[in-house]
Image (cartoon, rainbow, N blue to C red):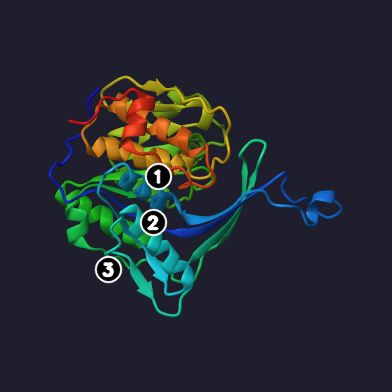
Amino acid sequence: MTTPFQLRTGTGIDVAGLGASTLDALTTVDQFPGGEGDENRGVQAAGCIALQGGGPIATAMATVARLGGRAAIIDALGDDWIGARILAEFAQCGVDTSAVIICPGATSAFSNILVRERDGERHIIFARGTAGEFPADRISRDLICNAAVLHLNGRHFEACRKAIEIAREHGTLVSFDGGKGRFRSESLELLPQVDIAILSLDFATQLLAAAGGSNERVEDPHEITTAIRRSLDIALIVLTDGARGSWIDPAGADTFHQPAFPVAHVVDTTGCGDVYHGAFLFALAKEMPLAECASLASAAAAISATALGGRGRLPTLEELQCDAGVPPAS
């Protein structure tokens, strides 16, 4: 199935991401700490510990680069050791950081993530940092103009508005990441201006409730994508729901379901959705049919779940083509 929009080819960047980058400290535990009086609230032994870059948009860009795509990140970091580590990992992944600004005396974002060993569920403690919002007047017009896709999630909100304005002027597609637990009312301002909306089931149901003023929760994926399309003119809607897979709804064509790839042992679900986004957009920028984009993304998310952290196991394109049965790109 072909895409419902015109993709610019021959651009300098496949995907440019605008969003917050973090450094994640991940620790596996038998159980999450309990409350007062719970025997699990005290000291407990850790399993595996890892320190790696994180953040939804940032991890998507690392995935694009790992697959051989050209990715760039737009963000504001502090000049602390955390920011230095984040930048070093981007460089190792091959992500362009020329649009990152460093704020003197500021701290960068840091997350402590506890991962429950038996099922990969996680508990996140997040410190936003003091670098602040990326200034809208510092958005690189050249970077946006030279990207096939701009990917964002509403962080650095005023910069998002400016970046979308530039993208729409120059034919760069705009992709929105609606992650689980991340719905904000200001998303309603951005979504009508995007071409691609990749939404978790949780985000999508909250979006419908806010847009329609109803407290009734819609659960059926087909009903959700149909309802979103009635109110928002979005060329491509992708709905994700973990182990249930994803639903791809292109304008003017039938919705189809992409099953999740089975995982024998889930280590950690942190960043699986972000990896899905990165792989999907990479494939889209390489002009793969939508069915192949979805299959490649699903395989990437499954592989990611076999290691600790969103970037603990980023697959190569060759691995995904083998697992997903997608032929090599021409």
> For the residue marked with disc 1, what is the amino acid?
Asp
- Report, in whole angstroms, how far the alpha carbon at label 1 lies from the one at label 2: 10 Å
**Helix, strand or loop under label 2:** loop
Name which of mark 3 and mark 1 comes first in the sequence.
3
- Report, in whole angstroms, how far the alpha carbon at label 3 lies from the one at label 2: 14 Å
**Which corner quadrant holds the C terminus?**
top left
Marks 3,1: beta carbons within 8 A: no
Q: Which mark is residue 232?
A: none
**Residue 107 pos. (x, y %):** 48, 72
Q: Which mark is residue 177?
A: 1
Marks 1,2: beta carbons within 8 A: yes
**Which residue carries the number 3 mark?**
138
The answer to whether residue 189 is above or below residue 8 is below
Q: Residues within 10 Å of mark 3 (few under 14, many from 20)?
A: few
Give me the residue at 45% from left, 53% from top: 55
Viewer-proximal residue, 214 or 73?
Answer: 73
- Report, in whole angstroms, how far the alpha carbon at label 3 lies from the one at label 1: 22 Å
Based on the displayed image, in which of its 4 quarters is residue 159 positioned?
bottom left
**Helix, strand or loop under label 3:** helix
> For the residue marked with disc 3, what is the amino acid?
Arg
Name which of mark 3 and mark 2 comes first in the sequence.
2
Name which of mark 1 and mark 2 comes first in the sequence.
2
The answer to whether residue 109 is above or below residue 291 is below
**Residue 325 pos. (x, y %):** 33, 22
**Helix, strand or loop under label 1:** strand
Based on the displayed image, in which of its 4 quarters is residue 148 positioned?
top left
Give me the residue at 74% from left, 52% from top: 45
Q: Which mark is residue 19?
A: 2
